[in-house]
Amino acid sequence: MLSKVYSTGLFGIDGFIVSVEVNGQPRLPQFELVGLPDAAVKEAKERVRTACENSGFPFPEAAFLVNLAPAYRRKEGSGFDVAILVGIMSVSGMIRGTVTLGDKCFIGELSLSGEFRSVKGVLSMCVAARDAGMSEIYVPEENAAEAAAVEGISVYGVHSMRQLVDHLNGRAVLSPMPRKSTAFSPHAPYEEDFADVKGQHLAKRAMEIAAAGGHNILLIGPPGTGKSMLAKRLASILPPLTFEEAIETTKIHSVSGSLPEGTSLLARRPFRSPHHTMSAVSLVGGGANPMPGEVSLAHNGVLFLDEMPEFPKQITDALRQPIEDEVVTITRANGRVTFPCSFMMVAAMNPCRCGYFGDPSGRCTCKPEEVKKYISRISGPMLDRIDIQIELPSLSYEELATKDTVKTETSEVIRERVCAARAFAIERMKKKVGEAQVKNGRGKPIYCNAQLDAAGIQSFCEATDGAHLLLKNAYSALGMSARGYSRILRVARTIADLSKSDIIREEHIAEAIQLRNLDRKYWS
C-alpha cells in the first residue's frame, strides 16, 4: 500500500516542497529511507519508531520504504520526522483512509516521547507550502506564531503526535493559529537612545545623514569618545521596518536559528556586532549546507565592526563585494545559494594602537611608522566604500558632568527627520522618472541615496554650477577616485534631502566633503 504526504526542506533561505512517499508491504519488518537524506534524516527511523510506540500506537510489523522526493535535492535536518510517521500511520490504517492529506503539510522533529520539537526555518517552509497550494500546515507549538505570519494558509500548532492523530481522525479537532496574534508592529521601542550620548554634536549630525541616505560610516577617535554608543543607537533612528522587510529579515534569522522564541516577525532592524576573531565563512556565510553569515543577518539593519583594524585584512576585504552588490552568492557542489545582505556598515577604530594619536593630551606613545602600519590595515578599496568618515574628539570633564542647558534630542525626534528626508527623496525621484517604483540598472528598487548607481547619480544628483566647481576643486586637491567622487555626490544629495532641496547646492557639497576628508589626514 502506498501513501503520500508533504513536508518542506530548506535550501539557503528558501523552502521547497518534499513529497514523503511511504510504501508498506506485509513482509518481514524492515525500514528503508531513500531520497538523498543526510545523517539527521536517516536517524529519523529510530525516532519515528520509538515516538510511535510511546504515543500509544503499535508500530506496524511490515516492510516500509520511505522516499523523499525530489531525490536529486539533499534533505537535511530533523524536520521530516512528523511527515514520515504520518505517512506510515496512513499506510497502516491508524489514520483513517477518508482523511485527505494532499492539501496538508507536516513539519517537526519528534522526541522519543512523541512530542513535537521546534525546527529552524519554519517561516520559509510555510511560504513554500502556501505557494505550492497547501491549505493547512502543522508545525510544533513553538513555531506556530512564526508560521502564522504567512497569509493564505491555516497554521496549526501541535504539541504531540497523539494530539495530531486525534485531530486528523476527528476525535479532538485543533483550532488554527489566529492571525490577530501575529499583528505586525513596526514601532517597537529601542532600549538605546541618542539622548544618552553626551556632546559629539558633529558625530550625531553625521549619523543622521548616514541614516537618511543609508550610507556607510567610519568613526575614528580615542577610547571612550562614544564610538560604540553612537553605533549601537543608529538602528533607533532608521525608518521602521516595512512588512515586506520584516518578512525577509525574519526568514534569514529563522533559517539561521537566531529568531527569538515565540517571535512572529522581527519588528526592529537587526544590529550585528561580530568579534574580530571571526572567520570569513562566519562573516559572509557558507558551510557544507550554506547558512547566512553576519552580513546577511544584518540585512535591512546595521553591521558594526568595532576596532576595524583588528579584523584580518582577508575579513574586511571580503566585505567589498557584499557592500557593492547587496547579495552574497555561495557556490557548492549541490547548488548555488544567494543570500540578501543590504545593510548599513558602521566601522569604529582608534587612530593608532595605543589609541591617542593626534589627541591634545599628547599621550600617544606610537612611532610614526607604527601609526602608519596600524592605519594601513584598512585597504584603500575598502575605505573607498565608506561614504562618511568622522573624527570624534575626547570629551572634557565639563561636557560629561554638566547637565545640558538644551535637552539632547531623542532618537524619535531624529528618526522623524530621517523618515521625512527619505520620503522627500522617493517623491523627488518619482517625479523625475514618472514611475511609482524607482529602480536601479539591475532592476532593484531604490529606497535611499546610497543605492544609486552611476545612472542614478547622473539622473538624480542635479547640482548648481557653484556646487560642481567646488566638487571639481576638491576632486583634484584630495586625490579622489571615481568611486569617491560618486560617494561625495550621494552624501551631498542626502544632505540636500534633509534640507528639502531639489538641487544640490554649494553648502551641501561642502558638508559632504567635510564628512569625507580623514583619508587625507590618516591615509595620505
Image (cartoon, rainbow, N blue to C red):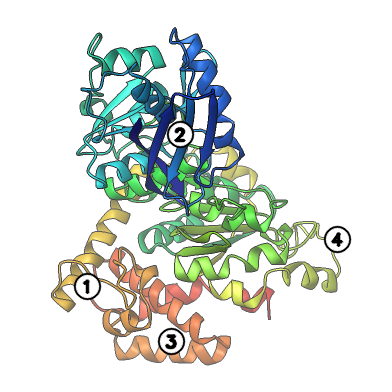
Labels 4 & 1 near each other (Cβ < 8 A): no
Q: Earlier in the sequence, mark 4 or mark 2?
A: 2
List the residue tagged with mark 2.
80
Within-10-Å neighbours for mark 2: few <14, some 14–19, many 20+: many
Q: Choose mark 2 or mark 3, whichever is in front.
A: 2
Cα gap from disc 4 to disc 1, whole angstroms:
51 Å
- Picture disc at residue 365: 4
- Picture disc at residue 471: 3
Cα gap from disc 2 to disc 3, whole angstroms:
60 Å
Cα gap from disc 4 to disc 2, whole angstroms:
61 Å
Going by the numbered disc 4, the residue's amino acid type is Thr
The residue shown at (73%, 62%) is: 312
List the residue tagged with mark 1.
429
Going by the numbered disc 1, the residue's amino acid type is Met
Label 3 sits on a secondary structure element that is: helix
The x, y position of residue 147, in whole percent, is: 33, 33
